Image (cartoon, grey):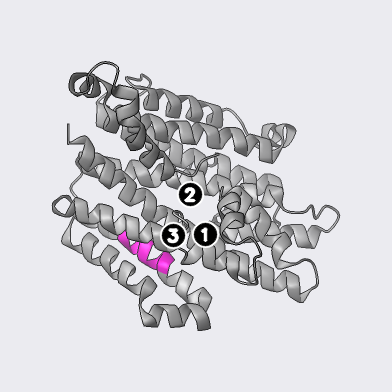
């Protein structure tokens, strides 16, 4: 078994790169939609960004830092504000720092790409691109993250480090896909305006690079049931929640060596139960429960899976009992646990 510290760095490096990519996808599509809506007189920036902040669990932090927000403050908060630990810039910097900590465990090409992205996002050229052509700036971040994934796939040995990288990426992707759906569930209802509803759900598909996949499965007409079916329950689409959880469950069993269908630790139990739930449900169950309520429950389970990974492979309770005197364990570990939990998007 590799050192828990190394596993933790690799796991979070992948999660933070995936989070930066998904936030770039979110801001890019959101600004496109906001421009269209304001042009057609359908809403204000405040009305549009509020569900985005709520679904990404950043509304409280934003209101604290920007008590009287101005135009462009939300995009700035999500992109460059280092006071926001989940901004794109914060995620990229943390990913680079985690990569630096395990420099000898990753390939030279992986390090070069993550370092180049870190330099780009705060370079004069990058900031000028963000000001003049923001869509191109976010596309660069998305492309770099996807290139990083491709380089990782092509250059990294399939060992435990690879498994922890995959696990971080898959859990983060499942979480962010669910949040994209949740944003739409909290947007002001467009019932009765089928064209507007189709446009809004189309934006969710674009954020997940899912337009082509949707057309192949459901045809050209966009419906909420079809989007939910693809992004929550598809076993083939690589950004769907079910696909990510199935792959995460396989990776966890590869790490522990436990046969598929059994479990040896809480994280395997949680992902197995979540996979079973997603495998035997579909859009009718979601519509009956309510999309927002269903996503809330799903995110609680995803957060529990992430916490269980930490407790099973980083916290290592057996090792803690050996090294911390009786009676000091909770206080001694509280700061460590808070630091790990702050990196997760809380429900």
Q: CA distance from mark 2 to mark 3?
A: 13 Å
Magenta segment range? 141-148
Residue sitting at 33 percent across and 55 percent down? Answer: 94
Q: CA distance from mark 3 to mark 1?
A: 12 Å
- Indicate the position of residue 23 as horizontal and vertical percent values: 50, 59
Q: Residue furthest top?
A: 326
- Indicate the position of residue 64 as horizontal and vertical percent values: 58, 55
Question: On the rendered structure, is 68 left or right of 264?
Answer: right
Q: Nearer the viewer, mark 2 or mark 3?
A: 3
Question: Closer to the camera, 140 or 128?
Answer: 128
Magenta residues, dominant SS class: helix
Q: Which mark is residue 21?
A: 3
* First of labels 1, 2 by sequence position: 1
Q: Is the residue under label 2 in contact with that under label 1 (CB below 8 Å)? A: yes
Question: Closer to the camera, 179 or 147?
Answer: 179
Q: Nearer the viewer, mark 3 or mark 1?
A: 3
Q: Residues within 10 Å of mark 1 (few under 14, many from 20)?
A: few
Residue sitting at 71 percent across and 57 percent down? Answer: 221
The N terminus - image quarter? top left
Q: Which residue is mark 1?
A: 209
Q: Which residue is mark 2?
A: 239
User: Where is 296 relative to 75, above or below?
Assistant: above
Residue sitting at 34 percent across and 24 percent down? Answer: 330
- Whether 147 is among the magenta residues is yes
């Amino acid at each position: 078994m590799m050192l828990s510290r190394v596993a933790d760095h690799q796991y979070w490096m992948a999660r933070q790169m995936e989070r930066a990519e998904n936030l770039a996808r979110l801001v890019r599509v959101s600004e496109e939609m906001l421009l269209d809506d304001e042009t057609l007189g359908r809403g204000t920036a405040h009305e549009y960004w509020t569900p985005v902040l709520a679904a990404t669990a950043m509304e409280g932090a934003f209101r604290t830092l920007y008590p009287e927000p101005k135009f462009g403050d939300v995009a700035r908060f999500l992109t460059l504000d280092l006071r926001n630990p989940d901004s794109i810039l914060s995620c990229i910097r943390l990913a680079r720092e985690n990569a630096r900590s395990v420099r000898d465990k990753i390939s030279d090409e992986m390090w070069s790409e993550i370092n180049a992205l870190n330099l780009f996002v705060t370079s004069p050229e990058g900031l000028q691109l963000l000001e003049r052509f923001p869509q191109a700036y976010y596309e660069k971040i998305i492309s770099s993250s996807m290139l990083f994934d491709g380089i990782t796939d092509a250059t990294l040995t399939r060992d435990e480090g690879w498994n922890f990288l995959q696990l971080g990426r898959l859990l983060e992707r499942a979480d962010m896909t669910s949040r994209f759906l949740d944003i739409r569930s909290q947007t002001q209802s467009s019932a009765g305006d089928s064209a507007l509803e189709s446009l809004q759900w189309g934006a969710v598909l674009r954020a997940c690079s899912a337009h082509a996949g949707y057309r192949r499965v459901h045809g050209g007409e966009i419906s909420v049931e079809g989007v939910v079916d693809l992004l929550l329950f598809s076993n083939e689409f690589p950004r769907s929640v079910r696909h990510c959880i199935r792959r995460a469950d396989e990776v966890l069993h590869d790490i522990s060596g436990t046969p598929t269908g059994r479990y040896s630790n809480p994280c395997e139990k949680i992902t197995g139960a979540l996979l079973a739930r997603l495998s035997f449900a579909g859009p009718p169950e979601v519509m009956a429960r309510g999309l927002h309520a269903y996503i809330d429950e799903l995110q609680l389970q995803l957060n529990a899976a992430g916490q269980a990974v930490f407790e099973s492979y980083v916290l290592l309770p057996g090792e803690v009992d050996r090294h911390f005197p009786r009676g000091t364990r909770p206080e001694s570990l509280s700061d460590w646990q808070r630091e790990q939990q702050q990196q997760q998007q809380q429900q």
